[in-house]
Structure formats: structure tokens, C-alpha cells
């Protein structure tokens, strides 16, 4: 899957000053002390999502290899 499809389309149209305005609004809404805590939580969420995806991939690969061995046993 290409990176273009992962990023929502509206993010590609934002220029530099628009990002600055968005960051200022976030700073005003959450305050300077709350932002590091929010980013830490976001990082933990992303990390656990990646771990879940890796575990699911391993389970799929394990299931495929078990299926292959069962087919080989049937042919013998």
C-alpha cells in the first residue's frame, strides 16, 4: 500500500502557515503542560497497534505453515 493512500487527502493540501495555526489552536486548547502527556499516550497507542499487527501477521504465517504441512501429509 502506498503512503499516499494512508495519509488523508486534506493533509496534503495544508501549507506551512496552516500547520502553524493548527499547532497554535492545539496549544491553546490543551496547554503546554498537557501536550507532552498527550503525545506520550499517542505514542503508546501507536506502539501497541504495531505490536498487535505484528502478532496478527505471525499468527497468519503460523496458520499458513500449519496448513501447508497438513496438505503435505495428505499427499504422502
Image: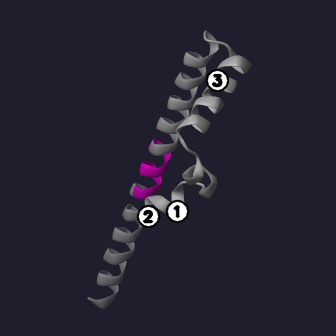
Q: Is residue 15 left or right of residue 47?
A: right
- Which of label 3 and label 1 is nearer to you? 3
The span from disc 1 to disc 2 (Cα, nearest Å) is: 6 Å
34 shown above or below 54 = above
Furthest-bottom residue in this view:
75
Residue placed under numbered mark 1 in the picture: 5
Instruction: Check whether the beta carbons of the residues at disc 1 and disc 2 lie within 8 A of each other.
Output: yes
Q: List x then y, in percent, for residue 67.
A: 39, 74
Q: Is residue 47 magenta?
A: no
Name the residue rendered at 53%, 23% in the picture: 40
Residue placed under numbered mark 3 in the picture: 24
In the picture, the quarter occupied by the N terminus is bottom left
Residue 2, label in figure: 2
Relative depth, front residue between 41 and 74: 41
Relative depth, front residue between 68 and 61: 61
Furthest-top residue in this view:
33
57 shown above or below 50 = below
Instruction: Check whether the beta carbons of the residues at disc 3 and disc 1 lie within 8 A of each other.
Output: no
Name the residue rendered at 37%, 63% in the picture: 61
The span shown in magenta is 51-57
Relative depth, front residue between 26 and 58: 26
Q: Secondary structure at mark 2?
A: loop
Amino acid at each position: 500500500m502506498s503512503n499516499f493512500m494512508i495519509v488523508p487527502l486534506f493533509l496534503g493540501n495544508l501549507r506551512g502557515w496552516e500547520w502553524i495555526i493548527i499547532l497554535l489552536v492545539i496549544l491553546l486548547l490543551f496547554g503546554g503542560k498537557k501536550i507532552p502527556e498527550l503525545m506520550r499516550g499517542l505514542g503508546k497507542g501507536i506502539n501497541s497497534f504495531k505490536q498487535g499487527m505484528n502478532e496478527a501477521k505471525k499468527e497468519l504465517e503460523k496458520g499458513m505453515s500449519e496448513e501447508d504441512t497438513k496438505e503435505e501429509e495428505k499427499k504422502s
